[in-house]
Amino acid sequence: MVNIGVLVSGRGTNLQAIIEAIEEGKIEGEIKVVISDNPDAYALKRAQQYHINTRYINFKEFKNREDYDKEIIKTLKEKKIELVVLAGYMRILSPYFIRTYKNKIINIHPALLPSFPGLHAQRQTFEYGAKVSGCTVHFVDEGVDSGPIILQKAVEVSDDDTEESLAEKILKEEHQIYPRAIQLFSEGRLIIKGRRVFIK
Ligand code: GAR
């Protein structure tokens, strides 16, 4: 049973998929807290509907990224969090945060990394004209979307796709692979060797 903390900034459909997977007994874990940098994130409402603890932390009240992250970490420690899940969290974590939870922070990105890291990955994919895209769950290291890859799923970009329809297709797959990756973590089945993650 793993104690999970989720960081969110937006609508929270991945959070929803994770909550549902836990309710269905697919993940042996419990979300102890959902933390957001955005007071209006719909993800907070979703969590509250399931009586999950939520916390909004205002970035403007802190003098830098590390101090902000220390406040998040305080809550994560209080809740005895063992896995930090970034679910549409739009801030870059400080090296301090990453060191504190080394190999215990995971993220989902809406592209097949290492292609199209950073913001608006679906738009980048679409504008570049790639024929295949997808999503990636990875451990978070000190770079941007550069940590060891846990799971990926590909989707085709068809001629009649728009940026929105592509994002929609990718999102559907995100909702499958993110709970699966969390399940593998909670079972202790993810073995990191250098850049590679083996599933035992
Ligand atoms: C998802 O598509 C996720 O992959 C992306 O934000 C969206 C959040 O949706 N994350 C990133 O781009 C991280 N750089 P959600 O709030 O509905 O889960």
Image (cartoon, rainbow, N blue to C red):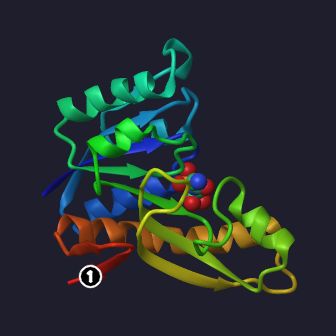
The correct choice, above or below, for 199 with respect to 110 in the image is below
Q: Is residue 62 left or right of residue 84?
A: right
User: In the figure, 153 relative to 44: above or below?
Assistant: below
Q: Secondary structure at mark 1?
A: strand
Image position, residue 126 (x, y; %): 81, 71
Q: Is residue 162 visible?
A: no
| Residue at figure coordinates x 68%, y 53% from the top left | 119
Residue 197 visible in image: yes
Q: Is residue 152 depicted above or below 5 in this figure?
A: below
Q: Quadrant location of residue 35?
A: top left
| Image location of residue 96, percent across then percent down | 36, 36
Q: Is residue 126 left or right of residue 154?
A: right
At x 30%, y 33%, the residue is 53
Q: Which quadrant of the figure has residue 27?
A: bottom left
For ligand 1, tell me if the residue under mark 1 lies within 8 Å: no
The x, y position of residue 109, in whole percent, is 55, 63
Mark 1, other Cα within 10 Å: few <14 / some 14–19 / many ≥20 = some
Residue 171 placement: quadrant: bottom right
**Residue where numbered disc 1 is placed:** 199
Residue in the foreground of this view, choosing between 131 and 56: 131
- Look at label 1 and name its amino acid: Ile
Quarter containing the N terminus: bottom left
Q: Nearer the viewer, residue 3 or 152?
A: 152
In depth, the one of 124 and 163 nearer the eye is: 124
User: With respect to residue 161, does 42 lie above or below?
Assistant: above
